[in-house]
Amino acid sequence: MNLTELLDDLLFDYTLRTVALGTAIVGIVSGVLGSYALLRKQSLLGDAISHAALPGVVLAFMITRSYGSIVLMAGALVSGVLATLLILAVVRSTRIKEDSALGIALSVFFGLGLMLLTVTQRMPGARQASLERFLFGQAATLVVADVIAMGVLAVVAVGLVMLLWKEFKLVSFDTEFASSLGFPARALEVALTTLLVVAIVVGLQAVGVILMSALVVAPGAAARQWTDRFGVMVFLAGAFGGFSGVAGAALSSTGSGLSTGPVIVLVVSLITVVSMLLAPNRGLVWNWVRQLRQRRQFRIETVLVDLLALSQQHESIDYGHTVEAIHAMNRGRRGEARTLRSLQEKGLVTSRPGGRWSMTEAGIVEARRILEATGEIPDPGPLPIGQVRVTPS
Amino acid sequence: MDRSSPLALEVTDLTVAYAEKAVLWDIDLAVPSGTLMAIIGPNGAGKTTLIKAILGLLKPAAGQVLLAGKGYDQQRQKVAYVPQRGSVDWDFPASVLDVVMMGRYGDLGWFRRPGKRERHLAMSSLVEVGLEDYADRQIGQLSGGQQQRVLLARALVQEADIYFMDEPFQGVDAATERAIISLLQALRGRNKTVIAVYHDLQTVAEYFDWVTLLNVRRIASGPVAEVFTEANLRLTYGGRIGFVEGISQATGTAGAAEP
C-alpha cells in the first residue's frame, strides 16, 4: 500500500478514521499531560498509574456486567486515583522511599488486576477478550461511542491545562514560590496528577496498561530536546503524541497484522530516539561534533604553545623544529603533522626544509595569548620571550 | 501600613517541630521596617525553617507571625521570597524573562496571563540586577551567580515591602556580592525591609544593620552594634570558640582581610 492510499483510507475509511481519531486523541492528551509529569520528575508515576488501572477495569465489569467504555474508564479512573493516594500515603507515613512505593503500588494493583481477570474467565457469559484488550490495547475495537467518551475526557483535560496554564507552569517550576504567592500549590499538584490519571485512562483501551507509560514519557522527552520554551515543549509533545497515534493506526491497518498499541509505541519511541540524537543543542550527535571540534582546537593550541617553548631554547625565531621534537613534548598526542598543516594554513607556523617547522611572529603572539588566557603565565615578563625579537603589532 | 505598629515583622513564640524534634524553639523577633537584617547561625540551626515558617510554607507547631501588623494571608502581596538556588530545577524549559515574570503571577491572580505590562516590569528588574542581556537565555545556561540574580529579580518584580532571602549570596563572586548588597541597601533606602540568611561573619557588620543569631533558639536579635558580640557568637556556634575568636578579631579590624 502506498502513502496516498493510506492517507485516502485515513480520511475516508470509516473504521480506520474512527480508530485513528481515537489514537490521535490518546497521543495528544498523554503527550500534553506527560510533559508536566516529566518536568515534575513523575514519569514513573505514569507507569504505576497505568498498571494500577487494571483492577479497576475488571472490577467495574464484574459489578456492572457491562463492557461500555464509560463504565470501564470510570473503573480505571477510580483505581488509578486510589493507587496514587496509596503511593502518597506510603511515602508520607513510612520510611519507604517514593521509587519503592511506586513499585509496590504497581505490582500489587497489577497483580490484583490479573487475578480478577482469571476470575472473570469462569464467569458465565463473559467475553474474556473484551477485557484482555486492556492489557495490550486493541485500537481496532474502538467504536464511535468510545472515541466520543475519550474525546470528552481529553477536551476537559487539555482545556483545564489551558485555563490553568500559568498556575500549572508556576507550580511545576517552583512549588514553594507558588505557595508564597498565595496559590494553593498542593491542590494544583493534585489536580495535575489527577489529569495525568485521566490522560492514562483515555489511552488504556487503545494502547493498554502495559505500554501506556511509554506514551506518557516519550513525547515529552522528545519535545524537550527541541526547545527551551515551556509552551513549545507542551505543544510539541502533544503533536508528537498525536502524530504517533495516527501513524500507528495507519501502519497497523496496512494488513501487516501488527496490533495498533505496540506500533504507536514504536513510532513514538523512534521519534524520541531521533530527537535524542539529532536535536540541536541537546542532541547527542551535536554534542559529539562539538566535542570533536573542541578537541581539535585544544590540539592546535597545545602544539602552538609547545612550539613556543621549543623556540625559546634557540636564538632565532627561524630555527626549524622536527615533528619528533614536538611529539616528544607530549607523548600521548597524535596527528601533529596534520595539526601543523592546519596551523600553517592560519599563518601561525611555516615549514622549513627537511620537514622542520618554525613559528611565525603571528604564531608567537597567538601562543602568548593562549597562555595568558589559560592563566598559565600570569606574568609573561620573566619568560625569555624577548630573545626571539618579538615585535607585537 | 499600620501606624501604631512600625514593625515590619513580629514573631511571637514560634516553634517548629519535625517528627516531634523541635527545630525552632520559642522564637521571638521584632524587626522594624527599613531594616537590612541577617539571620546567622550554624548548619541545622533552623535558618531556612524560620523563613519558611514565617511565609507559611511550613506549619508551625505554635506561635504567631505578623507582617506589618497583620497575618501573612492578608499581606501576601507585600512579601517577596527568594528561595535557595538549589531548590529550583534549572533545567526547566524557561527563559530568564519567563522566570522573572513569575514574580507578577501573585498580583495577576487566577487565570490571567502575563502580558506587556508584566514583560516590561520584568525587563526593568532584570536591568536592576544587570541581566538584561540574558533575558532570552534558558536559565540552565547561566552561571551560579547569574541564577542567583534571576531569583533576586523575580523577587524585585513583586514590588513588595518585605523581602525574605534564603542565602542570596551562595555561589556569588565578590563583585556580584557587592552589587547585590548595594541593591538591598537601595531597597532599605526606600523603607523596604530585607531579611536574609547569611553566612559570612566577616562582613555582617559591614553589610547589615540588624542581625538575628539563631541556633534552634533565638540567641540574640537586634542592631548589629548591640548583639553581634563575641559572647553571642560563642553561644550561637557552640564549642568552636577558636573559630569564633578569629572572626571577632577580624570584625574588630574591619577591612584587614581584604585581598
Image (cartoon, rainbow, N blue to C red):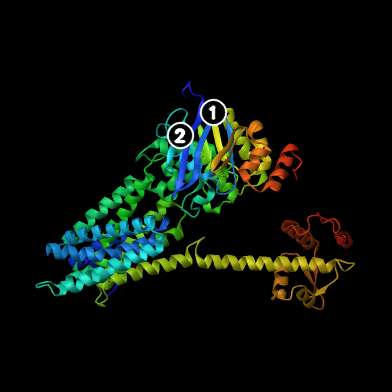
Which quadrant does the N terminus of chain A fall into? bottom left
- Residue bearing mark 1: B33
Q: Which residue is mark 2?
A: B65
Label 1 to label 2: alpha-carbon separation: 15 Å
User: Residue A258: x and y, percent?
Assistant: 27, 76
> Foreground residue, A4 or A228?
A228
Residue at image location 54% in from the left, 32% down from the top? B193
At x 34%, y 41%, the residue is: B111
Percent position of residue B195, x then y: 55, 36
Residue A27 lies in quadrant? bottom left
Q: Which structural element holds mark 2?
A: strand
Q: Is residue A132 visible?
A: no
Residue at image x 68%, y 42%? B202
SS label for mark 1: loop
User: In the picture, residue A381 is in which quadrant?
Assistant: bottom right
**Residue B67's spot in the image, x, y percent?**
47, 31
Counting labels gives 2
Q: Quadrant of residue A142?
A: bottom left
**Left or right: A198 with respect to B227?**
left
Q: Is residue B149 above or below residue B211?
A: below
Q: Give coordinates of residue B165: x percent, y percent.
A: 54, 41
Of the 4 image quadrants, the one containing the C terminus of chain A is bottom right
Mark 1 / mark 2, whichever is N-terminal: 1
* Chain to which the residue tagged by mark 1 belongs: B
Mark 1 vs mark 2: in front: 2
Q: Is residue A43 above or below residue B126?
A: below
Judged from this view, the residue extending furthest toward the left is: A125
Residue B30 can be seen in this image:
yes
Q: Amino acid at mark 1?
A: Ser
